[in-house]
């Protein structure tokens, strides 16, 4: 598990395929990898380089390549670097006045390759919010950056028409986030890198745009949710006319927490696209003509066996007569696969877990999709979704007289969804006799705009109700032990964990990773991207401060009685360490058993292999102590305070 490489964005440059790899065994650094037409694979950046950007704090879209020229953000100082095929390096952006104060992401070169058009986030004015703009960076190294679009709180997805005459982009303002209400714009782009005659293409109805791409000099493809589901639309730029191309209860887009997401690719007259349906991804092909939606063909990049059928589709890029995709299944880690309608070829194979780690396939759990009733309003009974993993260990099984303990997993975001691929962290639990339920609570993505927005005004209530309902549903159906229920989650999921333990008595133990304990503190101390997120999730700040306090576990220490593990990164800027320290102090004062493990070299999320392992082992140690059993593992000591 420690060495699991995460595959990110994919770019096709002629006959070459380039992609990003995040490597836990190398301190969590991200590397760009190149595969030549001859099949040779090599890192495209030096061993000391970390290709990441801090725009929006979550990053993504840190690099692009065209004609063998790689442009990327250097994590050490956030400056853009050009690396030519002969290895020559040119720094493209000026040194900022504030360390890492100018950050760049989501860029594309103009057709004449004179300019790199991208998002810039300027942290130079410490007295106010960072400024987000679209800029043109000269590719010659003169460092005379020009501002193209300024004014909106946020900008994303600058895409240049094939003839270089137009620039399209997405923008939005506080308190919206990119999955709420955004705007689609286009402007005339001059050769000297100026934007004129900017005009809005949408009609202001309120919709979430995703991944605009040019079909030709006057026509765009874009994903939007104007019919309640994120679907593909064709846009005539001249008349601002939208034509819907796909239809059905599935979604092409995912929430734009990071830049660089690609869920479809234009292949000749076809569009190959990922679609999330019933909680999992499938790959479809939209052919021209015919009825609305065209012809959609299911394609299985990892094979047709049920255990290896692709359930997670990542980055897509057009390649020859098909696409290159990042794909994974319930029993395989991410692979890079080239495919067309005639077959597929693996370009970057996942680890062979049997050979590399001694994990045979029968140790890997395959979940069951479940739907269950939820909600406190009996007059408006609703449903939520989860994936249930049974205990899976070919060498051992629990006593027939005992039901297994359950771990409820809470995903982050909270605008997000469960991971629909092999998670060795889940197998870690199921191999040790635990059942696991990964919950897509109301507010999760993949089930339409209405379901996604169901959490508005209800964070800390609705998500908690659904996690509680999932545990009760599984206990009532006789599948898990109602007296041994645990809950764990990170970030927003960590807040759900803390709220579930503070306001309900269903769980016997909980583990919060960099979780929010105090909504008031989060509203007052977080980064720009999420600065007004809680206006949508909780209520307008500070007008509804009373609601913030009412839902914050830290303000209800008298109700805390469930043992709790807190895991925190010392360099976290999204949920500062002060939140975990305050929660630990409240638990200490209330006499509730707890443990706090802090990682000095981690931010928001654990990237380094040793820390990933240490955090998981701490959870097992803690749950074993709470459920009074002795793990077979040789685990490091954990100090539990009471």
Image (tube, helix red, strand yellow):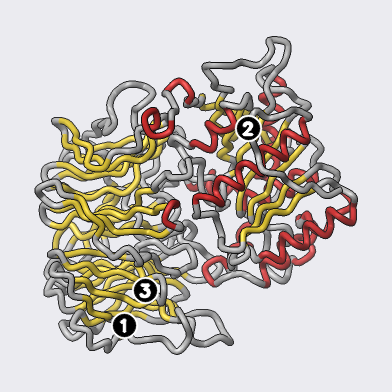
Q: Is residue 207 visible?
A: no
- Percent of width and height locating residue 344: 19, 34
Q: Is residue 320 visible?
A: yes
Q: Residues within 10 Å of mark 1 (few under 14, many from 20)?
A: many
**Does 598 appear above or below 502?**
below
Residue drawn 32% across and 55% down?
20
Answer whether labels 1 and 3 touch (C-beta < 8 Å): yes
Q: Nearer the viewer, mark 1 or mark 3?
A: 1
In three-dimensional space, the C-alpha distance between marks 1 and 2, rounded to whole angstroms, equals 50 Å
Q: Please tell me the numbered disc located at residue 164.
A: none
State the image quarter where residue 171 is shown.
bottom left
Name which of mark 1 and mark 3 comes first in the sequence: 1
**Does 186 appear above or below 248?**
below
Answer whether labels 3 and 2 touch (C-beta < 8 Å): no
Residue drawn 13% across and 30% down?
342
- Percent of width and height locating residue 493: 62, 49
The residue at which mark 1 appears reads as 93
Q: Nearer the viewer, residue 362 or 544?
A: 362
Under circle 3, the secondary element is strand
Under circle 2, the secondary element is loop
- Percent of width and height locating residue 602: 56, 61
In three-dimensional space, the C-alpha distance between marks 1 and 3, rounded to whole angstroms, equals 9 Å
Q: Residues within 10 Å of mark 2 (few under 14, many from 20)?
A: few
The residue at which mark 2 appears reads as 633
Name which of mark 1 and mark 2 comes first in the sequence: 1
Q: Nearer the viewer, mark 1 or mark 2?
A: 2
Residue farthest along the top direction in this orientation? 400
How many marks overall? 3
Residue drawn 48% across and 37% down?
423
């Amino acid at each position: 598990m420690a060495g699991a490489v995460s595959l990110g964005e994919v770019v096709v440059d002629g006959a070459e395929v380039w992609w990003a790899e995040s490597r836990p065994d190398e301190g969590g650094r991200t590397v760009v990898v190149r595969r030549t037409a001859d099949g040779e694979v090599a890192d495209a950046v030096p061993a000391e380089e970390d290709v990441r950007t801090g725009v929006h704090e979550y990053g993504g879209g840190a690099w692009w390549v065209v004609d063998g020229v790689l442009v990327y953000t250097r994590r050490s100082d956030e400056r853009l670097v050009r690396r030519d095929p002969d290895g020559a390096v040119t720094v493209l952006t000026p040194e900022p006045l504030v360390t890492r104060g100018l950050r760049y992401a989501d860029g594309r070169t103009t057709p004449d390759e004179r300019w790199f058009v991208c998002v810039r986030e300027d942290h130079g004015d410490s007295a106010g919010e960072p400024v987000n703009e679209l800029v043109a960076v000269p590719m010659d190294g003169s460092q005379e950056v020009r501002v193209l679009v300024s004014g909106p709180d946020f900008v994303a997805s600058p895409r240049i028409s094939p003839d270089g005459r137009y620039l399209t982009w997405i923008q939005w303002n506080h308190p919206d986030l990119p999955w709420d209400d955004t705007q689609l714009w286009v402007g005339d782009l001059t050769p000297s890198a100026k934007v004129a005659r900017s005009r809005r293409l949408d009609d202001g109805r309120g919709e979430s745009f995703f991944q605009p791409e040019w079909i030709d000099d006057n026509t765009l493809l874009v994903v939007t949710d104007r019919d309640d589901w994120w679907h593909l639309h064709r846009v005539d730029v001249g008349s601002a006319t939208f034509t819907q191309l796909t239809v059905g209860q599935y979604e092409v887009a995912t929430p734009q927490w990071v830049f660089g997401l690609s869920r479809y690719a234009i292949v000749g007259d076809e569009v190959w696209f990922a679609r999330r349906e019933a909680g999992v991804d499938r790959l479809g092909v939209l052919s021209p003509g015919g009825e609305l939606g065209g012809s959609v063909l299911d394609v299985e990049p990892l094979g047709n066996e049920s255990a290896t059928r692709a359930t997670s589709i990542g980055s897509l890029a057009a390649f020859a007569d098909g696409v290159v995709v990042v794909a994974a299944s319930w029993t395989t880690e991410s692979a890079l696969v080239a495919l067309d309608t005639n077959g597929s070829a693996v370009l970057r194979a996942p680890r062979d877990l049997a050979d590399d780690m001694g994990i045979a396939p029968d140790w890997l759990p395959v979940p069951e999709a479940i739907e269950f009733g939820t909600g406190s309003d009996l007059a408006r009974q609703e449903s939520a979704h989860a994936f249930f993993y049974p205990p899976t260990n070919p060498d051992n099984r629990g006593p027939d007289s005992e039901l297994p303990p359950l771990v409820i997993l809470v995903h982050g975001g909270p605008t997000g969804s469960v991971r629909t691929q092999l998670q060795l962290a889940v197998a870690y639990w199921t191999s040790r006799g635990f059942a696991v339920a990964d919950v897509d609570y109301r507010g999760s993505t993949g089930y339409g705009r209405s379901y996604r927005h169901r959490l508005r005004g209800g964070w800390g209530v609705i998500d908690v109700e659904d996690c509680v309902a999932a545990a009760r549903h599984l206990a009532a159906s006789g599948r898990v032990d109602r007296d041994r229920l645990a809950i764990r989650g990170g970030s927003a999921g960590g807040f759900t964990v803390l709220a579930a333990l503070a306001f309900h008595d269903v769980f016997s133990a909980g583990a919060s990773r960099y979780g929010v304990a105090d909504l008031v503190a989060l509203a007052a101390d977080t980064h720009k991207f999420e600065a007004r997120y809680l206006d949508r999730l909780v209520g307008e700040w500070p007008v509804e401060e009373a609601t913030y306090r009412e839902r914050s576990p830290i303000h209800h220490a008298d109700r805390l009685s469930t043992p709790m593990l807190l895991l925190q990164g010392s360099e976290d800027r999204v949920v500062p360490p002060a939140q975990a320290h305050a929660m630990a102090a409240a638990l200490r004062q209330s006499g509730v058993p707890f443990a706090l493990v802090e990682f000095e070299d981690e931010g928001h999320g654990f990237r380094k292999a040793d820390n990933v392992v240490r955090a998981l082992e701490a959870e097992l140690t803690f749950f074993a102590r709470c459920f009074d059993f002795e793990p077979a593992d040789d685990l490091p000591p954990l100090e539990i305070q009471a």
